[in-house]
């Protein structure tokens, strides 16, 4: 957060509010535009601008903040991970951010099966702590790696295992709450808990319940996923007068949670996944509820794995090309458990034999199970893009009907979509009758917004006609609260209003949600964006050239806000190192959104807030592949820097490292002298002048660049040796800057291996007196896009004739390969030759696999550790490298995450500590723990340099390792 006393540029009332908050609260208080911009949106369609952001350190801070806000008449919005999709985590007053400090697991009692948590505890952290005792927290929404317990309690979240363990409300035992009026209370179960309330609340609750017993007993639909409205029926005597349950799902409108006691469950020791194929979505929906009687889960049998733990549904339009699925057009993912793997497998086989399916498969391998579950968990992001690339939005994300009604409901739902000319991809918790869907609403134009509203009203009627709930998991917020009278009638909604006024008579907690809600078509987050595309340098081919549409890709599901990357994942290393929202992919996208909106971030392309947030973006491109909606922050950063520094003096590193190919070419003749000077005290002055971190060693220059070696080896410049058969397949080897001037041994090794595989190797423009060819990477990463385009045009001019016959372009440096594959066509979108050059790019391993498929690499037969380059992971993939390593006997997976050097990033002054922190996450521990004989692999020059500078080990390119194992060249 920015400085807690910053008040510049705010109105007098807000400045006074900030001063008083800063005096009263020990945590951070910020009115800075950047901090407020980060909180304008959650994962919904809505946007509201707060006046201030407070990160309380403890419950006393929360009480102090509420007191100050109450005295100023300023509303308060509690906020967890900001993944709510109905708008309830946005607000116009003071946002209380619980993710910064209030994230402690206060106690965990394995015997009692309970945990006491603060509201900012991330679900996966609780699950990890409970897992040490063989326990877990039952509800598990797809955002489990970043959602908080406070947010889950606020929304009454559920997840895929709800058929076994119910909703969050089923797991809540006690809540410690502060009201807007300053009352502290502990909400539990039973009349004793009610008696302990302050008199005003105790008497008011009793009067409300006793006065409308009949309505409370008959006004609620009976279905497992009824989340909408206040759960006032939980206060009925026959329901145990459960005040904690009544407050769960109240979306921060009644009180501010400061601590919760929750129940834990003991999952089965073993799980297998049965994937049941069905002809289509309707058939899967019809079948889902018939699977539930296979061991009544909620009766307790699921505690030992007797019944289905999940019954999740997905259709082909969402799953796409996911491998390992049985024949069908839609699938049910049914997880079965047992005390042993054999028992779980037997239960799954029995279920499959009894189910009516087109086909089925049973997945026992945990890695395959995780891969399939990732498809489901990423759906909240992937479903935001239709197959043709058009945008789709939440709004009707999670309505629910009785499970037996799901098939008929889905048919009617599809018919209503067709009536309005809309499209969506339903998926979700079929076993509980709860459907998620993103719909291609036009929320940018007035006619589109009118259609959104009309469709929503009709769909509300449809849900109610099927006996359903407007919300089945994520709450009503602003998206659906306006329609609550359709579901409950005006009389019961009137009780909701009375309950709200009892707890919050001043209306200071999350106004506009649930009770007296804002209209569903107000506060849409797209309204302030530019109506026409802004002038940009990149082509943004997946967003029709519209930078605003590219930024809109971030819908806020926050997969980038995880404390640890998933298997072989990269995104988002800077967030994991700092823990700050502005250093996440989502945070940066939010700031760019607000920069385009111009209301909070007013500097446009000159914005310092956006510049500072992007400064710690490593341009690793991890979000391009790991973000479910394909946000490409490396490209957005380059675009921003291009405009931000247009006509202005740039940072020194942009000149020293952004133009590195020029300097290396000029320095090559004096390499021995410069290498010697780099090891003298003069190097410190040079680093200061070049904006280079003083802790960094300057890499040694090659005394014989790769291209010079090549020219001497093959004077004709063709690269064809006299002994090479004339008809062997030809490859064009790209002499990238890093290989040429800094690591020529990699190029020499690659030539040796490629020729040993029977390939003819050529280099472009060898021996010609002309400006060297370059992919433009260093200019792109520093936002010098005019120069990058000039370099790339020269490259296309030279390469296209050489590749026209289908010759592959083999690139040894992954970052250069990624630049040629993606940045080249996106910066030269009007030149069809650029796309053809990009399509020809292959990695070293891909070239061998495609051009020499029967060649057997030499056996190395040793363990391997190291780093998969971020850009290779994000753009090119490493499947071919994995296969080549396996064939050579190099056993062991390489690290995910990021090495932290990331080209120029880790060399820039001010980035060293973060660079090392990123390396310490996975890479450095794996290298240190490797046995002495293990091979340390890193195809990227940055990765090899980081390993060399931070460990005593030397990393090598895969080509070097294979070349060493081959017979020497003659």
Image (tube, rainbow, N blue to C red):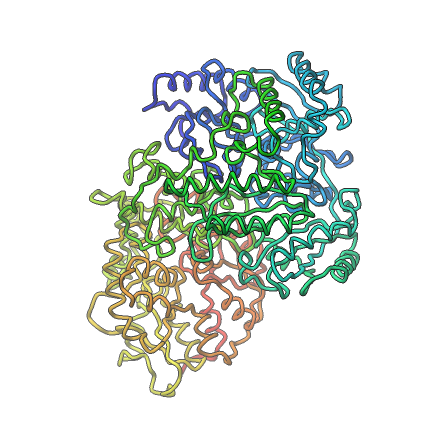
Above or below residue 28? Residue 449 is below
122 vs 406, nearest the viewer? 406
Residue 721 location, quadrant: bottom left
Quadrant location of the C terminus in the rendered image: bottom left
516 vs 922, nearest the viewer? 516
Residue drawn at 28 percent across, 56 percent down: 660
Quadrant location of the N terminus in the rendered image: top left
**Side of 297 relative to 139 (left or right):** right
Q: Position of residue 115 (x, y in %)?
A: 69, 33
Above or below residue 3? Residue 420 is below
305 vs 509, nearest the viewer? 509
Residue that extends furthest to the top in the rendered view of this protein:
199
**Side of 162 relative to 750 (left or right):** right
Q: Position of residue 226 (x, y in %)?
A: 65, 37
**Side of 505 relative to 635 (left or right):** right
Residue drawn at 41 percent across, 37 percent down: 525
Residue drawn at 29 percent across, 79 percent down: 718
Q: Position of residue 728 (x, y in %)?
A: 40, 84
Residue 174 location, quadrant: top right
872 vs 289, nearest the viewer? 289
Residue 128 can be seen in this image: no
**Count of numbered circles on the image:** 0
Residue drawn at 78 percent across, 55 percent down: 340
Q: Position of residue 439 (x, y in %)?
A: 49, 48
Residue 319 can be seen in this image: yes
């Amino acid at each position: 957060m920015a400085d807690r006393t910053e008040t510049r540029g705010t109105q007098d009332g807000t400045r006074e509010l900030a001063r008083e908050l800063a005096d009263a609260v020990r945590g951070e208080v910020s009115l800075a535009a950047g901090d407020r911009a980060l909180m304008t949106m959650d994962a919904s369609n809505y946007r509201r601008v707060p006046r201030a952001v407070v990160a309380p350190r403890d419950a006393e801070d929360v009480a102090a903040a509420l007191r100050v806000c109450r005295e100023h008449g300023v509303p308060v919005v509690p906020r967890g991970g900001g993944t709510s999709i109905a708008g309830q985590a946005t607000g116009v007053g003071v946002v209380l951010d619980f993710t910064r400090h209030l994230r402690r697991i206060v106690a965990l009692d394995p015997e009692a099966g309970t945990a006491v948590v603060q509201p900012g505890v991330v679900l996966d952290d609780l699950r990890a702590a409970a897992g040490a005792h063989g326990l877990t927290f039952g509800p598990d929404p797809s955002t489990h790696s970043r959602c908080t317990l406070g947010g889950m309690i606020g929304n009454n979240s559920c997840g895929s295992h709800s058929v076994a363990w119910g909703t969050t409300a089923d797991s809540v035992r006690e809540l410690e709450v502060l009201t807007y009026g300053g009352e502290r209370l502990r909400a539990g179960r039973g009349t004793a808990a009610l008696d302990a309330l302050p008199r005003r609340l105790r008497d008011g609750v009793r009067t409300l319940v006793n006065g409308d017993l009949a309505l409370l007993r008959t006004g609620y639909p009976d279905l497992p996923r009824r989340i909408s409205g206040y759960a006032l029926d939980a206060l009925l005597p026959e329901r145990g007068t459960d005040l904690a349950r009544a407050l769960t799902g109240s979306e921060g409108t009644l009180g501010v949670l400061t601590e919760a006691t929750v129940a834990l469950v003991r999952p089965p020791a073993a799980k297998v996944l049965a994937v049941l194929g069905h002809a289509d979505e309707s058939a899967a929906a019809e079948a889902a509820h018939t699977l539930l009687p296979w061991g009544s889960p909620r009766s307790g049998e699921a505690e030992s794995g007797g019944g289905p733990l999940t019954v999740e549904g997905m259709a082909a339009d969402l799953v796409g090309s996911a491998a390992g699925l049985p024949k069908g057009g839609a699938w049910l993912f049914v997880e079965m458990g047992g005390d042993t793997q054999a028992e779980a497998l037997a239960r799954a086989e029995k279920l499959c034999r009894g189910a009516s399916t087109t086909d089925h498969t049973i997945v026992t391998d945990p890695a395959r199970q995780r891969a399939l579950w990732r498809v489901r968990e990423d759906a909240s992001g992937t479903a935001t893009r239709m197959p043709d690339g058009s945008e789709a939005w939440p709004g009707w994300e999670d309505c629910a009907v009785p499970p037996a009604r799901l098939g008929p409901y889905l048919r009617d739902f599809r018919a209503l979509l067709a009536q309005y000319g809309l499209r969506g991809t339903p998926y979700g918790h079929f076993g509980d009758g709860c459907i998620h869907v993103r719909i291609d609403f036009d929320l940018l134009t007035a006619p589109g917004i009118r259609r959104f509203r009309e469709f929503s009203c009709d769909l509300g009627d449809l849900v109610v006609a099927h006996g359903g709930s407007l919300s089945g998991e994520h709450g009503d917020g602003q998206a659906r609260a306006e329609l609550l009278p359709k579901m409950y009638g005006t009389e019961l909604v009137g009780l909701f209003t009375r309950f709200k006024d009892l707890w919050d008579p001043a209306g200071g907690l999350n106004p506009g949600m649930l009770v007296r809600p804002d209209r569903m078509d107000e506060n849409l987050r797209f309204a302030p964006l530019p109506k026409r595309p802004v002038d940009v340098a990149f082509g943004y081919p997946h967003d029709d050239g519209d930078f605003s549409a590219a930024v809109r890709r971030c819908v806020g599901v926050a997969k980038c806000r995880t404390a640890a990357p998933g298997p072989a994942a990269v995104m988002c290393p800077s967030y994991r190192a700092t823990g700050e929202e502005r250093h996440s992919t989502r945070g940066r996208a939010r700031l760019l959104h607000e920069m385009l909106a111009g209301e909070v971030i007013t500097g446009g392309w000159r914005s310092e807030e956006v510049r500072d947030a992007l400064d710690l973006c490593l341009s690793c491109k991890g979000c391009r592949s790991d973000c479910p909606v394909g946000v490409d922050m490396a490209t957005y950063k380059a675009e921003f820097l291009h405009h931000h520094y247009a006509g202005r003096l740039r940072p020194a590193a942009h000149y020293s490292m952004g133009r590195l190919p020029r300097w290396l070419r000029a320095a090559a003749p004096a390499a021995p002298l410069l290498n010697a000077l780099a090891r003298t005290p003069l190097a410190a002055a040079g680093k200061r002048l070049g904006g280079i971190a003083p802790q960094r060693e300057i890499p040694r220059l090659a005394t014989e660049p790769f291209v010079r070696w090549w020219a001497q080896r093959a004077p004709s410049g063709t690269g064809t040796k006299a002994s090479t058969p004339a008809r062997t397949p030809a490859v064009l080897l790209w002499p990238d800057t890093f290989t040429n001037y800094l690591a020529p041994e990699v190029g020499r090794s690659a030539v040796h291996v490629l020729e040993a595989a029977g390939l003819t190797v050529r280099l472009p423009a060898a021996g010609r007196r002309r400006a060297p060819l370059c992919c433009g990477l260093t200019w792109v990463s520093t936002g010098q896009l005019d120069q990058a385009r000039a370099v790339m045009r020269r490259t296309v001019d030279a390469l296209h004739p050489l590749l026209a016959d289908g010759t592959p372009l083999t690139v040894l440096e992954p970052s250069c390969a990624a630049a040629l594959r993606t940045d080249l066509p996106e910066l030269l979108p009007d030149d069809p030759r650029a796309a053809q050059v990009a399509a020809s790019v292959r990695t070293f391993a891909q070239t061998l696999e495609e051009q020499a498929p029967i060649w057997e690499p030499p056996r190395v037969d040793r363990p391997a550790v190291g780093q998969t380059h971020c850009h290779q992971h994000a753009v090119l993939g490493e499947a071919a490298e994995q296969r080549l390593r396996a064939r050579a006997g190099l056993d062991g997976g390489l690290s995910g995450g990021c090495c932290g050097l990331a080209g120029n990033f880790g060399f820039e002054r001010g980035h060293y500590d973060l660079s090392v922190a990123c390396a310490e996450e996975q890479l450095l521990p794996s290298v240190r723990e490797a046995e002495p004989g293990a091979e340390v692999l890193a195809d990227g020059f940055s990765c090899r340099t980081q390993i060399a500078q931070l460990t005593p080990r030397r990393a090598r390119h895969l080509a070097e390792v294979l070349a060493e194992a081959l017979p020497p060249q003659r």
